[in-house]
Amino acid sequence: MRQLNVDLGDRSYPIYIGEKLLANKQILVPHIRGRQLCIVTNDTIAPLYLPLLQEMLTGYQVDTVVLPDGESHKNLDTLNLIFDGLLSARHNRTTTLVALGGGVVGDMTGFAAACYQRGVDFIQIPTTLLSMVDSSVGGKTGVNHALGKNMIGAFYQPRCVIADTALLETLPPRELSAGIAEIVKYGLIADYAFFEWLEAKMPALMARDKAALAYAVERSCQIKAEVVAQDEREDGIRAILNLGHTFGHAIETAQGYGNWLHGEAVAAGMVMAADLSWRRGDISRTELDRTIALLLQAKLPVKAPADMTDETFLTLMGVDKKVLDGRLRLVLLESMGKATVTSDIDDELLKQTFAACR
Ligand code: NAD
Ligand code: GLY
């Protein structure tokens, strides 16, 4: 097992990464402060992994809330099901919520924990590759609104993250690819050597090679933890973690939540960000092509939907949380392995990117 730390003063917490951690009582129990637990999961994950977790938690009041599966349920109505479960089983302020699931379950459980009785403990047990490398770490929690993705939420850190890579065996191939998109992101924004490692190891990752997956999760979490420790509430550098996300969120919103997976939209969005970076002269055409080739190896989309017009993109990108005083800000590549956030965007180059990437 590998252990990393997210350094946030008195809200610091460990990330455990390894095989068969779900059934390991010694890892989870030290992070539970009260006698009540509420496991939040969904109707796909519950039959696979809930019994294993429940069996281990003897000696506690353990209640469960099983949400409907899917991004389309990541909203305030579904969030209320968590509060219904907590209140009807009389959970008090010393309860701990346990998120057993991917990013949708994790984001909603974290937000419920932030709100319930003005804040209770929560633990992240990510079950998708994407949630292991991204959403379970860093404390962004929330739900979608019909007018914008993740628009209602809070920064709220978990007590720990337990990434059991054995759970990835049951993950559908499309979800594996979606997680790889976020892993490629870390190489692009912060570590060119990791990007090159990914070029060499993509076949192994796609074949679910255990050692390759464990290293990819660890390196991704390391990079994310370092960035979050510097800028928890995204006043500055944390925005680089959103490479491709402004374009990607526009794609997700335009297509209807759940039709494009988050990681798929981020993949196409990263190609758009890399394309614009190339047009600005910051990366070479070869580097752009290598980025596209890597994402294609991971069976990810590298173009936006053909029917998305410039106007649709611009309108939806205007709702992005990075917009400041009405000015669009984008995360672009300063070079391979280094990202920058800029509002100095040439409209003509942006239009060329829209035209080239759909
Ligand atoms: P997800 O939570 O929808 O899970 C994907 C699918 O895989 C679901 O159908 C789920 O039931 C299923 N599943 C999960 N684990 C499984 C397993 N081990 N075996 C079989 N099936 C399994 O999707 P996701 O990609 O994990 O998360 C996407 C969400 O995360 C989006 O809502 C996105 O906005 C959010 N997100 C948040 C952050 C953050 O910092 N908080 C970062 C990135 C993404
Ligand atoms: N997924 C981007 C962030 O956590 O900031």
Image (cartoon, helix red, strand yellow):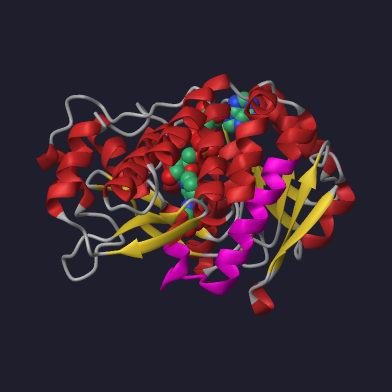
Task: Please state which of residues 228 and 92 is positioned toward the viewer in this rendering.
Answer: 228
Task: Please state which of residues 120 and 347 is positioned toward the viewer in this rendering.
Answer: 347
Could you tell me which residue is drawn at 36 percent across and 54 percent down? 282
The answer to whether residue 218 is magenta is yes
Q: How many labels does the image show?
A: 0
253 relative to 56 in the view: left or right: left
Magenta range? 215-239
240 relative to 165 in the view: left or right: left
What residue occupies the far right of the structure in this picture? 26
Residue 67 appearing in the image: no
Could you tell me which residue is drawn at 44 percent across and 47 percent down? 79
Q: In the picture, residue 286 is in which quadrant? A: top left
x, y (%) of residue 239? Answer: 42, 62
Could you tell me which residue is drawn at 12 percent across and 49 percent down? 348
x, y (%) of residue 66? Answer: 56, 35
Q: In this view, does 212 lie above or below 169?
A: below
Could you tell me which residue is drawn at 84 percent across and 52 percent down? 27
Residue 321 appearing in the image: yes
